[in-house]
């Protein structure tokens, strides 16, 4: 076994730590800290530690050769994920477009670390991870690491392969088991190079982190397993395998770091972190109505206008309201409260105040774009008793039952009905962005969609939106190879032509028909200008059982590519595209509040494949998602990136307002845009429209 370590600095620091060790420093006051490349650890090397679930950290690190910009998210207590962009200062970009003057090489990477064993009194915490899969491969590495805390000192020891193991200071145990593990195969950037995992030379790395008696300050010392002889930035001089650093927390959310690497290089950086579970803004809306005591004088049921007005104040836009002998029916759209239980509770409180004691059942039917989604049956007497705190045996939720709306019964009701045909305006902001392109590191477009919807009947409506481009730099997107010279049709890479032709363009204009087909089935059809680049017609069918973890659907679309020179014309490219989709909310404790979907079918470039999407919702309502698409377009034909992938952040708009609402915003991150694996951006998607059937976007 090879072993070449200098333990002098480590021994000195351990002795100092032992002298000042105090039990009050058992856990660092400010939690864990980030490495240079992102993810919890020391300076260059990861540790087995994990941040709290929902912890989100935005990091920047700078040294002579590299600038690292990363975002690290603790998706689950057992899973840490990191997205990173690296600016390699010493290398110019050179690719299919040739040498790009003034542009340095960029690398994008995704990391994942999994907790294998929690720390106990005698055993360390153990984690394993993969760095930089999906990038250009220059920082790709795998590791297994252990951490053990003794008083104010946290000890870390790990073994790495790839970038973390280039010094080869120890024999790889996998090489002993299988000869093929002794060599690390080369690969092509942008691909998932699983065949190289845990292959090649291995190295031990590790160090200690000391929490000083001064709470904001921590000291770090690590032994690095990389010899930096084959770095993408060149051969980096190494005067010492030891790195040292200080970590200072300016506030609960903001920290700074200063480190000295390889005995000759100074590095610095900062991190800002917050908890996606707890981020929120206090609401100034009305408090839930108290339920009057039994025997109080209740307003007569004939005052329908008063009931409708108070339901609106409770966040419920009434479409229909009627009262029978012992049953009241309200049908409408929830526009204020994201939580289903709170929404139904507030509606029930209004009815309990406004209706006489003879009304024993409240039927609350929630609709979205005229589609009946779910009916909540409320036992009036049981609800009132719980709301008055007359018994501790049950809550108001116990008086409610979610059932499928019965269309025939709804159609037979007589009473107040909101106006039918009419126009409703629409105004929303949008933000599109793409990272790490050869022409420009970061490309973006910001603007507003201005338009609306005219409703003809409960099923038929007309939609239209103008895109007002306020800010963008897509004019720097120079992927201008003609379609005849590419094996893949140019279905998305004309984006510059669409985005920059005018400040105001027609985003979409289409006729839309939707219908509740009965039971758990929903359908829609649409025709017109469907999105920025395509128009045509299509249809979708969705089976979504009430409160089920499973649903599935299928869509089929025949579209033509819109002209980027004239607003209302089409060019001579058409395609039949569509997908079969399966959606699953696992519901397991270790994967709580997650949604997985698989879509298989044909994409805009007539390529066939599948898209896998993962989404995680946090307690605040923020959703973090990622997707990968692999089609039969080869790596050589696809170009940089190898396959389509991206990330997004979906957030409730009421996080920025003191008024409750159900609206959401979305921020996408696309590493690089190419033509393979590109779906049609359908203007209405039934799975999102029917979310209240089995709520995920709460």
Image (cartoon, rainbow, N blue to C red):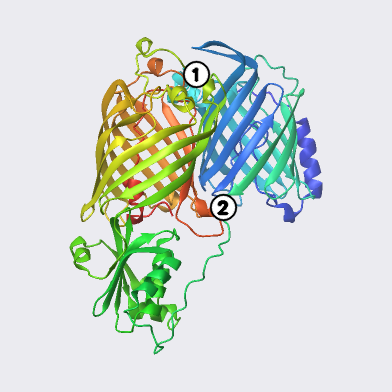
Image position of 128 (left or right of 267): left
**Rounded to the nearest whole Å, what is the CA distance between mark 1 and mark 2?**
49 Å
Q: Which residue is mark 2?
A: 656
Residue 428: percent from the left, percent from the top?
A: 47, 45
**Numbered badge on residue 650:** none
Above or below residue 25? Residue 105 is: above
Q: Nearer the viewer, residue 121 or 431?
A: 431
Work out which quarter of the rendered image holds the C terminus and state it: bottom left
Residue 278: percent from the left, percent from the top?
A: 57, 55
* Residue found 24% across the figure and 77% down from its top: 324
Q: Is residue 75 visible?
A: yes
Q: Secondary structure at mark 1?
A: loop
Q: Secondary structure at mark 2?
A: helix
Above or below residue 342? Residue 202 is: above
Residue 693: percent from the left, percent from the top?
A: 32, 55
Q: Quadrant of residue 154?
A: top right
**Numbered badge on residue 184:** 1
């Amino acid at each position: 076994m090879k072993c070449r370590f200098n333990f002098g600095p480590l021994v000195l620091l351990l002795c100092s730590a032992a002298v000042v060790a105090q039990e009050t420093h058992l856990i660092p006051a400010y939690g864990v800290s980030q490495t240079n490349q992102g993810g919890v650890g020391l300076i260059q090397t990861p540790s087995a530690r994990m941040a709290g679930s929902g912890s989100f950290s935005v990091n920047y690190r700078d040294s002579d050769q590299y600038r690292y910009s990363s975002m690290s998210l603790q998706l689950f207590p057992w899973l840490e994920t990191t997205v990173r962009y690296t600016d390699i200062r010493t290398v110019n970009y050179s690719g299919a477009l040739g040498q790009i003057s003034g542009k340095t090489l960029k690398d994008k990477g995704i990391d994942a670390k999994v907790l294998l064993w929690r720390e106990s009194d005698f055993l360390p915490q153990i984690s394993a991870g993969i760095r930089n899969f999906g990038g250009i491969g220059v920082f790709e590495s795998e590791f297994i690491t252990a951490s053990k805390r003794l008083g104010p000192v946290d000890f870390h020891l790990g073994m790495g392969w790839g970038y973390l193991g280039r010094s080869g200071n120890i024999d790889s145990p996998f090489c002993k088991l299988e000869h093929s593990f002794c060599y690390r195969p080369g690969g092509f950037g942008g691909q998932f190079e699983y065949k190289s995992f845990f292959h090649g030379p291995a190295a031990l790395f590790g160090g200690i982190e000391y929490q000083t008696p001064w709470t904001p300050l921590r000291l770090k010392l690590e032994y690095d397993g990389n010899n930096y002889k084959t770095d993408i930035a060149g051969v980096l001089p190494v005067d010492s395998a030891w790195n040292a650093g200080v970590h200072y927390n300016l506030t609960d959310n903001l920290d700074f770091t200063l480190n000295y690497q390889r005995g000759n290089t100074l590095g610095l950086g900062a991190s800002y972190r917050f908890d996606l579970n707890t981020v929120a803004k206090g609401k100034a809306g009305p408090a839930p109505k108290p339920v009057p005591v039994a025997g109080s004088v209740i307003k007569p049921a004939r005052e329908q206008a008063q009931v409708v007005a108070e339901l609106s104040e409770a966040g419920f836009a009434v479409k229909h309201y009627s009262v029978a002998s012992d049953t009241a029916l309200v049908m409408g759209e929830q526009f204020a409260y994201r939580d289903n239980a709170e929404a139904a509770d507030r509606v029930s409180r209004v009815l309990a105040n406004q209706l006489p004691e003879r009304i024993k059942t409240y039927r609350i039917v929630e609709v979205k774009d005229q589609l009946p989604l779910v009916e909540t049956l409320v036992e009036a007497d049981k609800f009132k008793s719980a709301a008055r705190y007359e018994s501790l045996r049950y809550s108001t939720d116990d008086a409610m039952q979610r059932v499928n709306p019965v269309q025939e019964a709804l159609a037979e009701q007589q009473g107040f009905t909101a106006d039918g045909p009419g126009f409703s305006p629409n105004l929303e902001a949008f933000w599109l962005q793409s990272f790490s392109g050869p022409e420009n590191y970061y490309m973006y477009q910001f603007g507003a969609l201005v338009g609306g919807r005219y409703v003809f009947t409960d099923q038929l409506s007309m939609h239209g939106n103008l895109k007002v481009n306020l800010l963008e730099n897509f004019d720097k997107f120079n992927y201008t190879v003609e379609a005849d010279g590419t094996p893949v049709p140019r279905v998305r890479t004309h984006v510059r032509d669409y985005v920059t032709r005018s400040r105001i363009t027609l985003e979409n204009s289409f006729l839309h028909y939707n219908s509740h087909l009965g039971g758990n089935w929903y359908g829609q059809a649409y025709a017109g200008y469907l999105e920025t680049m395509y128009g045509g017609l299509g249809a979708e069918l969705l089976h979504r059982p009430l409160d089920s973890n499973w649903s599935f659907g299928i869509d089929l679309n025949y579209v033509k590519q819109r002209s980027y020179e004239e607003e209302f014309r089409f060019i001579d490219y058409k395609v039949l595209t569509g997908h079969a989709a399966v959606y699953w909310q696992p519901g397991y404790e270790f994967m709580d509040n997650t949604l997985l979907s698989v879509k298989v079918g044909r994409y805009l470039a007539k390529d066939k494949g599948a898209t896998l999407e993962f989404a995680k919702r946090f307690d605040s309502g923020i959703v973090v998602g990622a997707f990968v698409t692999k089609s039969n377009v080869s790596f050589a034909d696809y170009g940089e990136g190898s396959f389509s992938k991206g990330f997004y952040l979906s957030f409730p708009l009421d996080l920025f307002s003191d008024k409750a609402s159900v609206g959401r915003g979305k921020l996408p991150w696309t590493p690089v845009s190419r033509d393979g694996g590109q779906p049609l951006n359908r203007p209405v998607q039934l799975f999102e429209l029917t979310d209240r059937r089995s709520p995920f976007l709460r």
